Structure formats: structure tokens, C-alpha cells
Image (tube, rainbow, N blue to C red):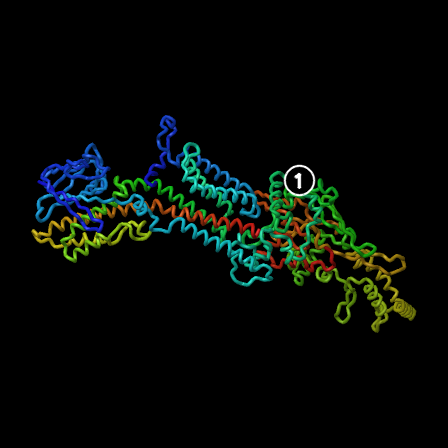
């Protein structure tokens, strides 16, 4: 899915929209940014209403404007959450998933305005502000996700160089196999070095390593350095063997770093959803607590 | 150049079986057909799938037939070169062809090892490459968050509520339901921040007045409930809707909390907005036709002229003062029982001013009298202490009448019968001045006759001196007499009687009883800005300014330029008690003014009880 979103920012220019119905239109540019304009209009209207309507003694969630904003906000949040259900059913046309996603993104952004105006900028250490903070986290991770989807697929594609993930894995397995076969004549010392290189995979390490740009001290890199540093006696019969091993290790190293780069970009593409979705549910819980508490202690 | 083709397979026990065959060709056909040089038995492979050509110098080229795709060294392609020295691998379907240089007896040949093995499962690969293995799953963390929040922010506070229900005073520990606080408490209620149930008594029932009245026991109401209901205007559609919503959710009308909004931040609780007053007081007379209260909705635009309560008589037959509310426009005249021309006393050129200059060393007067020489602010600086004879008048208006051994005797102020008695005593106990011709060193006309006449007259004078008191008493209570100068004298009913009396004097400490004026707040101004005392020739002049004077600085709810926003609560108190209005109290509590709020109600600025 990530690799498909590379050109989600592209949109039709007005000219020839009908004559070129097949040209791709991303969800951001859907219907000429219809939902974007809608969200902008809603936000501006609400900000103006907030400024013009005089709530005494100060704006708060308990005024009529506050209750209205809160109700709109919670309905919007529930609807935005429904994308998770909706996206599993693809439909075309006006009610397409693209339209829904476009509305999800833009109305989600306008929720930032609605929710914040609902607070009346009265924030504190309480369940109400917790709900607001969770909402903001969800929105900000959403913005991060959109940005990632806009920027990263091209880099992912460049790095892949037209190989698939299965092929990357096969390549690694092939190299490992060849390395294993080629290393059979080796003594115990170098054999252990090669074994360590064979044992190295691209998938170990935690989230920091996934997202980090650097990968410290892999066994393959060490083996390669060790063999390259080996003194080179002239006409050693083992020379050819070591040349081959070096070549294989270099290939493994290249394959590993490609996979790691692939994993890093893919992690950047995916990580936001691992916050966006669970925090959405946390938000729903906090929102329930917020609403119940307000009426519990009315 | 020739090739060695090895087919490698495994038994179910894992043992390797290798079949080798040498092929001496420079071109190898790969495919499913039996005449291929490398036979790959898989339906995914075409009969002739690809061809390997020897290019010499250990270099091979691999090309798929009719552009069938191959994967060479992990890359999908239709054609590729492989250096056998460096090795390489070709994948066709599930088959892998490893290319390497032969060793030992196969030295110099290119060995192609054919394995059949399944590649990585696409689904498991996808999982392997996904982030899901590295971070906790979305579902798991979502449930964890939901549980955490529901327990800490919902279950725990409800537990706090239930466990503290009916408890008189909560334990001084952290209570879960304080997580629900929707904003800081105002200063006055800050001590209740840990005790939600002090106000929120019942769950899902909005705060009731009974909770407020637990502590605020003696708050007077604004008016009778039915009158207030009657004075409410028809609601507009929007507010009617809001009221319908409030009623639906069992939220009471006109409760304490309708105006007094809590949880709006630390500091003073904000004053109720002007709209709360204006709702009813705009065109009030159309709904309350009997009311004596004038319409008002904004000090700047719609507010009646001030109607101070004026004393029309300091004492009637029963000794009670009479008051009347009169508009400033109607040039009210008051009668406090005192004669006092302000103009005379404030003049800079007359005898009063000269007297002030003479007494300046003792009393701190300036070149002439000023307001502050007599009018002393009360401790709260809101109003002024009453004028007293002893403190403010007596230095000039002396009641001295006798000198005995260097001590001056004065008439008793405030007790007319004592004045009469003292004058009588004076004339009874003192002798007339001795005539000069009765002294030892007399010079007189010759002859005894003159002396005898003088003695006789003196004796008569001494005998009848007590009777002179009547004249003196009359004089003191009559025009140019000491009492008459300042007081209204009540003449005796019978001409011969001497039972003079003085009309009681009452001073008004507060004219505006529905409003509140704080002199302390106006100390930046001169007295004369508002009070035209220096041209007032009669004590009956009411020296209060009209509303126009106030409006020079005070605007209504909205102000422009230097004007001061002046909402209702600046001067008026909703709860009709004697305390200062809410805005004044709020300001005082900020430390700009003497602190004690409650003092406003019980200040002894008015000893005679006139308010």
C-alpha cells in the first residue's frame, strides 16, 4: 500500500479532467480539494464565531457554544474513527473510499480547530485536557503519516531498485547458501567468522534500530574487514577462495544495507499508524470519561 | 569450455543426493522439455525457458526466451551476465541455479548446481518486513490504553465519589475524582478543590442552590421569586431553545450557578455579566406595571437620573426623620436641621478665611478652609465621618461664656436645657461688675448723694442680677445668638417661657441606597469636580452631581477612548445587602484598597443609624 501512494499529492489540473478520466487523482486533491476547502471554511467560520460570540466570563466548554463545539467534535471523532471500518469496503464514485479518505484527512485537520475552541484554551492536569492532548496526538501523527506517504514512497522505490521484498530475501538466502558452500574449506577461525556473518539478518534490533540511520558493527561487515585485512601472500592457493568469500560478503553487505534502508523507510511509513490507531482508541476512552465526568459532576 | 551440471536434492531424512553430468557445449538450453541441457521439472517453467551462453574468460550470459523473466542475483531481468569467478545465482520458478567455478577434478569448468527449493512465503515475508514484529501491535496497545484510561479516569473517580458519599469532610489525601476538575477554583472556593462533593452532591444532578446555602446562610434574595419570574422578558428562539435543553436535562433556572460560574480559573469569581441585569430591567415597567423601579439597561445609554434619598425634615412630631427620594433634576432641597452655607466657609477672601489663617498653626488650615478640613474619610475611605461640633466647628464657633482662674467655661453643646441652666447659674452666682466709683481709689462728684445713688443702683443690680439671665438666654437662642447661628431653634410655645429647644441635626452618610459610590476610588479627582460646594449658599442645597457628571468618565458596558467600562455590578448589588457591589469587592480584595469586605456592611460611619 505504501508503494502505491507515491503520487498521492498529484491532482488533476482543471483542463481535460473529463477527457482524461484515467489520470490518477490522490485523496488530497480529490475533487479539487473539495473537503480541504470545506474544512477550511468550517475552521474559519468557527474561529470567527468564537471571536464574535461573547461568552461570559470567558470561553469554556460549558457554554452553549462550548456544548455545540463539543457535540460536533465528538460526532466528528466517531465518524473519523469509522474510516477503519470503511476502508475495508471499497466502493467507487462519489461515495468512493477516496472521497471518504479525503474527508477524513481534511475534517480531521479541522477537528484541531473545533476541539481547541471547545476547550476555550482552558487546559490543566485533568481528564478533559487528557482527551484534548490525545486528540492532538492523533491529528499530529496523521499529519506525519500524510507527509510520510507523500515523501517516502519515492525513496522506497529508489532503494528497492525494482526488486520485491521476496526477491530481497531470496537474494540474501542465495548469498548465504553460496557463502556456506564456499566457506567449507576454511579453518576453524575464519569459518567462525563466516558463520557469524551467515547468522546476521537484517531484521534484528528494536524500533530505534529500525528507525535509526546507522547500523553499528554487523558481523558481515566485520568478516569483510577481517578478510580484506588479511596479508596477501603471492600465489597462495587459498587466494581464489578468499576472493570469492570477499565478493560474497560484499554482496551480502550490500543486500543487508538495502534491506535495512528498505526497513527504515517502511518503518517511517508505518510507525505513525502504530500511534495513530491505538491513541485513537485511547482518545475514545478518554472522551467517554470526559463526557461522563462532565455530567456526573454537573 | 564445458559445464558441469549438478542436480541436488534431499531425501526426507535430509540427506543430500547429488547427480552430476558434464556437458561439453558452449550454450545450454534450460527448460521443461526433455531435450533441454538443464531440465527443470515444474509447470511454471516453459519448455524452453532460457539459454546460458559461454562468453569466454569465465563469463556467462543468461537470457530468457521471448523475454521470459528470470531473476539473476536477486534482480528480475530478461538478460544478464554472470562472472563465474565471482559466482552468481539464477532463479527460475522454484529452481535455483548456482554458478561457480569448479575445483579439484572439475578445475577449469563452470559448475551449475540446480536446487529445487521453495522461495520465501510472500505472506510471511510481508510480515517479516512489517513493523509489527518490532513494536507492540495496534490492537494490543489500543486495548491497553483503553483499559488504563477507563480505570484511572473513570472507574477510580467514581470509586472516590461512592466511597466519600455522605462523608462530612473528606480525608486530606488525593481523591480520584479531582482528575475531573474542569478548571481552577476561584480563590473563595479554593479550599474546596479536593472536595468535589461539597457542591456536586448527587451524581448526574447539576449543582443545586442548597449546596451553596450550606455555607452562604444569609444571602438576601434579589426580589420575590414570582416577581422575578414576572419581570422576565419573552425569550428569543435561541434562548428558549437553550432553556428547553436545560429543562430537559433537569438543570434548574435562576439558580446560584446560573450567574456564579465556578471553575473559570483562579482569582476572583468573575462578576455576572450586565446582560443578566438588563434582561429584566430593560423595559421593566411593561411587565411589572406597578413597579417603582425605573427602566435601565446600560449606564451609558439607558439609566434614570439619580434619585438620592433626601431628608426633608430631621425630626417630625414623633422625633423621626422624614426622607424622600427625589431626582437630581428636580433640584431637591434637604433639611438636616443645620444652617451651613458652604460658600461662606470656602471663600478665600472673607472673615472665615482670615480666621482660618489665624488658626492655621493650631489646626493646620491653609489660606482658607478646604473640604478636607472638616470632611474626614471613614477608615474604608468609601464615605465620610459625620461632622461634629467638637472636632469641626468649635475652634471658631466658640461657646465660651466665662473665665474662672484661667479656665474657660463653655456652654454644653447638644443639651439646650443645660445651656439654660448654666446661664441662670452664671447670673445667680456672679455679682455685677463693681462700679468704679465704689472702689477705694474712686474719683467722684462731690457730695454723698452721688455715692449713695451709686450704692443703691449697684445693690439693686446685684439683687436683681439673676433676672438678667432671661435676657441672656433669649439672646443666645435668638438671631445673632450662639445657637441660632447654626441651628434651627424651636421657640417656646408661650412667649414668657424660656423653654427653647433645638431641632435635632441628622447628617446623611449615604444618599444612594440602591447604588454604591466609593469616594476612595475617586481620590484622583478634586471634590469640586463633582460637588459645587463653593457656590452653595444654603444648607438645603443637595450637592450631589447628576448622572451627566458621572458619564463624563463612566461609559456603559462598552467604552471608547479613556472612558471606563461600567457595568451594573460596579455600583449595584444583586443581593440586596449592605455590602459593596461585587466589582468593588473584587477590586478591594485585590489589595488595592483596605481588605476587609465584610466591614462595608457594618461600618459605624453612621452613629445615628441614618443610611
Query: Is residue B566 in sight in this rendering?
Result: no
Query: Is residue A260 in sight in this rendering?
Result: yes
| Chain designation of label 1 | B
Report the residue that reaches farthest toward the bottom: B440
Image quadrant for the C terminus of chain B?
A: bottom right
SS at badge 1:
loop
**Image location (x, y in percent) of residue B433:** 83, 68
Dividing the picture into quadrants, the one containing residue B461 is: bottom right
Q: Is residue A231 above or below residue B53?
A: below
**Image location (x, y in percent) of residue B538:** 75, 50
Residue B595 left/right relative to B140:
right
Q: Nearer the viewer, residue A222 or B265?
A: A222
Q: Nearer the viewer, residue B525 or B250?
A: B250
Residue drawn 71% across and 58% down?
Answer: B606
Residue drawn 41% across and 49% down?
Answer: B139
**Image location (x, y in percent) of residue B542:** 72, 49
Residue B444 left/right relative to B529:
right
Image quadrant for the N terminus of chain B?
A: top left
**Image location (x, y in percent) of residue A285:** 48, 50
Dividing the picture into quadrants, the one containing residue B599 is: bottom right
Q: How many residues crowd around disc 1 within 10 Å: few (fewer than 14), some, or many (20 or more)?
A: few
Report the residue that reaches farthest toward the right: B449
Identify residue for label 1: B234
Amino acid at each position: 500500500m505504501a508503494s502505491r501512494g507515491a503520487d498521492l499529492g498529484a491532482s488533476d489540473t482543471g483542463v481535460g479532467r473529463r477527457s482524461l478520466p484515467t489520470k490518477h487523482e490522490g485523496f488530497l486533491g480529490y475533487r479539487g480539494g473539495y473537503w480541504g476547502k470545506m474544512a477550511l471554511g468550517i475552521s474559519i467560520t468557527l474561529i470567527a464565531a468564537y471571536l464574535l460570540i461573547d461568552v461570559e466570563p470567558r470561553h469554556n466548554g460549558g457554554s452553549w457554544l462550548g456544548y455545540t463545539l463539543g457535540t460536533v467534535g465528538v460526532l466528528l471523532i466517531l465518524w473519523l474513527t469509522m474510516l477503519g471500518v470503511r476502508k475495508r469496503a471499497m466502493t467507487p464514485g462519489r461515495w468512493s473510499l477516496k472521497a471518504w479518505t479525503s474527508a477524513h484527512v481534511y475534517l480531521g485537520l479541522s477537528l484541531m480547530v473545533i476541539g481547541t475552541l471547545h476547550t476555550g484554551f482552558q487546559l490543566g492536569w485533568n481528564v478533559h485536557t487528557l482527551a484534548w492532548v490525545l486528540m492532538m496526538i492523533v491529528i499530529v501523527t496523521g499529519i506525519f503519516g500524510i507527509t510520510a506517504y507523500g515523501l517516502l514512497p519515492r525513496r522506497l522505490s529508489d532503494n528497492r531498485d525494482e526488486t520485491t521484498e521476496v526477491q530481497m530475501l531470496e537474494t540474501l538466502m542465495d548469498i548465504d547458501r553460496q557463502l556456506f558452500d564456499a566457506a567449507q574449506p576454511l579453518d576453524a577461525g575464519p569459518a567462525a567468522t563466516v558463520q557469524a556473518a551467515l547468522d546476521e539478518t537484517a531484521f534484528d534490533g528494536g524500533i530505534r534500530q529500525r528507525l535509526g540511520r546507522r547500523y553499528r558493527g554487523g558481523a558481515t561487515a566485520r568478516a569483510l574487514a577481517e578478510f580484506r585485512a588479511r596479508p596477501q601472500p603471492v600465489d597462495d592457493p587459498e587466494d581464489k577462495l578468499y576472493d570469492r568469500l570477499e565478493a560474497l560478503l560484499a554482496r551480502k553487505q550490500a543486500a543487508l544495507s538495502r534491506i535495512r534502508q528498505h526497513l527504515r523507510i517502511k518503518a517511517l511509513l508505518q510507525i505513525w499508524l502504530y500511534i495513530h490507531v491505538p491513541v485513537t482508541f485511547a482518545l475514545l476512552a478518554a472522551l467517554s470519561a470526559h463526557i461522563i465526568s462532565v455530567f456526573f459532576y454537573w | 569450455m564445458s559445464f558441469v551440471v549438478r542436480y541436488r536434492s534431499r531425501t526426507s531424512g535430509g540427506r543430500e543426493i547429488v547427480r552430476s553430468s558434464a556437458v561439453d557445449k558452449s550454450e545450454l538450453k534450460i527448460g521443461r522439455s526433455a531435450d533441454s541441457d538443464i531440465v527443470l521439472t515444474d509447470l511454471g517453467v516453459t519448455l524452453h525457458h532460457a539459454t546460458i551462453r559461454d562468453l569466454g574468460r569465465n563469463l556467462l550470459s543468461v537470457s530468457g526466451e521471448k523475454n521470459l523473466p528470470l531473476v539473476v542475483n536477486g534482480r528480475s531481468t530478461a538478460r544478464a551476465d554472470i562472472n563465474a569467478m565471482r559466482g552468481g545465482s539464477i532463479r527460475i520458478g522454484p529452481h535455483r541455479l548456482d554458478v561457480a567455478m569448479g575445483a579439484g577434478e572439475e578445475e577449469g569448468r563452470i559448475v551449475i548446481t540446480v536446487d529445487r527449493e521453495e522461495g520465501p512465503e510472500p505472506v510471511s515475508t510481508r510480515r517479516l518486513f512489517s513493523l509489527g514484529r518490532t513494536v507492540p501491535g495496534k490492537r494490543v496497545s489500543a486495548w491497553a490504553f483503553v483499559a488504563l484510561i477507563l480505570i484511572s479516569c473513570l472507574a477510580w473517580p467514581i470509586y472516590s465519589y461512592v466511597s466519600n458519599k455522605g462523608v462530612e469532610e473528606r480525608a486530606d489525601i488525593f481523591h480520584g475524582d479531582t482528575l475531573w476538575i474542569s478548571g481552577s477554583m476561584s480563590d473563595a472556593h479554593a479550599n474546596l478543590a479536593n472536595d468535589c462533593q461539597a457542591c456536586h452532591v448527587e451524581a448526574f444532578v447539576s449543582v443545586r442552590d442548597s449546596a451553596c446555602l450550606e455555607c452562604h446562610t444569609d444571602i438576601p434574595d434579589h426580589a420575590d421569586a414570582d416577581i422575578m419570574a414576572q419581570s422576565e422578558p419573552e425569550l428569543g428562539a435561541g434562548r428558549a431553545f437553550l432553556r428547553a435543553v436545560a429543562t430537559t436535562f433537569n438543570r434548574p433556572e435562576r439558580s446560584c450557578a446560573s450567574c456564579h460560574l465556578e471553575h473559570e480559573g483562579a482569582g476572583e469569581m468573575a462578576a455576572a455579566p450586565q446582560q443578566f441585569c438588563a434582561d429584566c430591567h430593560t423595559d421593566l415597567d411593561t411587565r411589572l406595571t406597578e413597579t417603582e423601579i425605573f427602566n435601565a439597561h446600560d449606564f451609558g445609554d439607558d439609566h434614570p437620573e439619580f434619585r438620592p434619598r433626601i431628608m426633608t425634615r430631621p425630626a417630625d412630631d414623633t422625633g423621626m426623620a422624614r426622607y424622600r427620594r427625589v431626582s437630581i433634576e428636580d433640584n431637591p432641597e434637604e433639611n438636616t436641621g443645620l444652617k451651613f452655607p458652604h460658600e461662606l466657609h470656602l471663600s478665600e477672601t472673607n472673615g472665615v478665611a482670615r480666621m482660618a489663617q489665624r488658626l492655621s498653626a493650631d489646626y493646620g488650615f491653609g489660606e482658607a478652609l478646604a473640604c478636607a478640613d472638616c470632611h474626614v474619610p471613614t477608615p474604608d475611605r468609601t464615605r465620610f465621618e459625620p461632622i461634629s461640633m467638637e472636632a469641626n466647628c468649635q475652634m471658631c464657633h466658640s461657646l465660651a461664656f466665662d473665665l474662672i482662674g484661667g479656665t474657660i467655661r463653655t456652654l454644653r453643646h447638644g443639651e439646650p436645657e443645660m445651656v439654660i441652666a448654666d446661664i441662670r447659674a452664671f447670673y445667680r452666682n456672679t455679682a455685677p461688675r463693681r462700679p468704679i466709683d465704689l472702689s477705694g481709689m474712686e474719683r467722684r462728684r462731690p457730695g454723698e448723694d452721688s455715692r449713695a445713688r451709686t450704692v443703691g443702683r449697684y445693690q439693686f443690680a446685684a439683687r436683681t442680677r439673676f433676672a438678667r439671665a432671661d435676657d441672656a438666654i433669649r439672646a443666645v437662642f435668638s438671631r445673632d445668638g450662639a445657637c441660632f447661628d447654626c441651628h434651627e431653634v424651636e421657640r417656646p410655645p408661650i412667649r414668657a417661657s424660656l423653654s427653647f429647644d433645638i431641632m435635632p441635626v441628622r447628617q446623611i452618610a449615604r444618599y444612594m441606597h440602591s447604588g454604591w459610590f466609593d469616594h476612595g476610588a475617586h481620590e484622583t479627582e478634586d471634590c469640586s469636580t463633582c460637588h459645587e460646594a463653593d457656590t452653595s449658599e444654603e444648607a438645603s442645597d443637595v450637592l450631589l452631581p447628576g448622572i451627566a457628571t458621572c458619564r463624563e468618565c463612566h461609559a456603559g458596558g462598552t467604552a471608547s477612548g479613556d472612558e471606563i467600562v461600567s457595568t451594573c455590578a460596579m455600583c449595584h448589588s444583586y443581593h440586596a445587602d449592605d455590602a459593596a457591589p461585587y466589582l468593588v469587592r473584587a477590586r478591594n480584595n485585590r489589595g488595592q484598597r483596605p481588605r476587609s469586605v465584610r466591614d462595608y456592611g457594618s461600618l459605624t460611619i453612621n452613629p445615628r443609624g441614618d443610611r
